[in-house]
Image: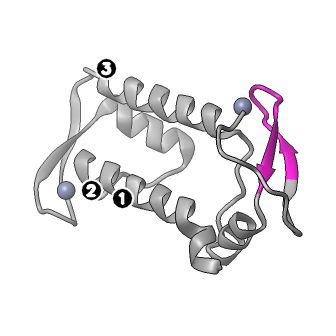
C-alpha cells in the first residue's frame, strides 16, 4: 500500500510482491532506470524491501564473531574489521569482501536509494 497518489501512465506495470503478495506498481520511469543501470527489477514492495534491509543491518550489528580481517576503506581510508561471520556471509553469497567501511557503505546505499527514488523526476 502506498500513501502517495498514483496516476497510471503508459508503460507502468504491476507485479506481485514475493513476500506479502500485494500488487506493486512498477513505474515506467523506474523501469527505464533499472534497465539503464542494468539493475535487476525489484521483486518486493517498498515495505518488504525496507523490512529486509532493516533485518539485514540488524543481523550485521548483532554480529560479535571474531575479526577475520582488517581492511582499509577505499573511500575514507579508515580501517575497519570484517568478522568471520561477515566473511562467511560474503563468501556464501559469492560476493567479494567489502572495500568500504560500514558508514561509507551505508552512505552509498542511501545515495543509490535516493537516485532510484528520483529517477522518474530526472527522466521527465
Ligand atoms: Zn510486500
Ligand atoms: Zn569509509
* Residue 93 occupies quadrant: top right
Tell which tag, 1 or 3, sits nearer the viewer: 1
**Badge 3 is on which residue?**
62
Magenta residues span 14-26
Q: Is mark 3 within 8 Å of ligand 2?
A: no
Question: Contact (CB < 8 A) between labels 2 and 1?
Answer: yes
Residue for point 72% across, 33% down: 1
Residue 28 location, x and y as percent?
Answer: 78, 67
Which quadrant does ligand 2 occupy?
bottom left
Whether residue 21 appears in magenta in the rendering, the answer is yes
> SS of the residue at dot 2?
loop
Question: Contact (CB < 8 A) between labels 1 and 3?
Answer: no
* Residue 82 occupies quadrant: top left
Residue 30 location, x and y as percent?
Answer: 69, 64
> SS of the residue at dot 1?
helix
Few, some or many residues within 10 Å of mark 2 (<14, 14–19, 20+): many
Residue 12 shown left or right of residue 73 in the figure: right
Give the Cα distance between marks 1 and 3. 21 Å
**Badge 1 is on which residue?**
108
Give the Cα distance between marks 2 and 1. 10 Å
Residue 114 shown left or right of residue 37 in the figure: left
Residue for point 14% across, 62% down: 76
**Badge 2 is on which residue?**
100
> SS of the residue at dot 3?
loop
Q: Is mark 2 within 8 Å of ligand 2?
A: yes
Tell which tag, 2 or 1, sits nearer the viewer: 1
Few, some or many residues within 10 Å of mark 1 (<14, 14–19, 20+): few
* Residue 62 occupies quadrant: top left
Residue for point 89% across, 69% down: 10
Q: Is residue 13 above or below residue 85?
A: below
Residue 34 location, x and y as percent?
Answer: 67, 67
Residue 45 location, x and y as percent?
Answer: 70, 39
Amino acid at each position: 500500500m502506498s500513501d502517495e497518489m498514483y496516476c497510471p501512465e503508459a508503460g507502468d506495470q504491476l507485479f506481485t510482491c514475493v513476500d506479502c503478495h500485494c500488487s506493486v506498481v512498477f513505474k515506467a520511469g523506474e523501469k527505464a532506470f533499472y534497465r539503464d543501470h542494468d539493475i535487476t527489477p525489484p521483486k518486493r514492495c517498498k515495505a518488504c524491501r525496507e523490512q529486509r534491509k532493516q533485518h539485514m543491518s540488524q543481523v550485521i550489528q548483532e554480529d560479535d564473531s571474531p575479526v577475520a580481517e582488517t581492511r582499509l576503506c577505499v573511500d575514507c581510508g579508515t580501517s575497519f574489521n570484517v568478522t568471520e561471520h561477515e566473511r562467511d556471509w560474503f563468501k556464501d553469497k559469492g560476493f567479494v569482501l567489502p572495500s568500504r567501511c560500514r558508514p561509507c557503505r551505508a552512505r552509498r546505499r542511501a545515495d543509490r536509494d535516493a537516485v532510484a527514488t528520483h529517477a522518474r523526476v530526472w527522466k521527465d
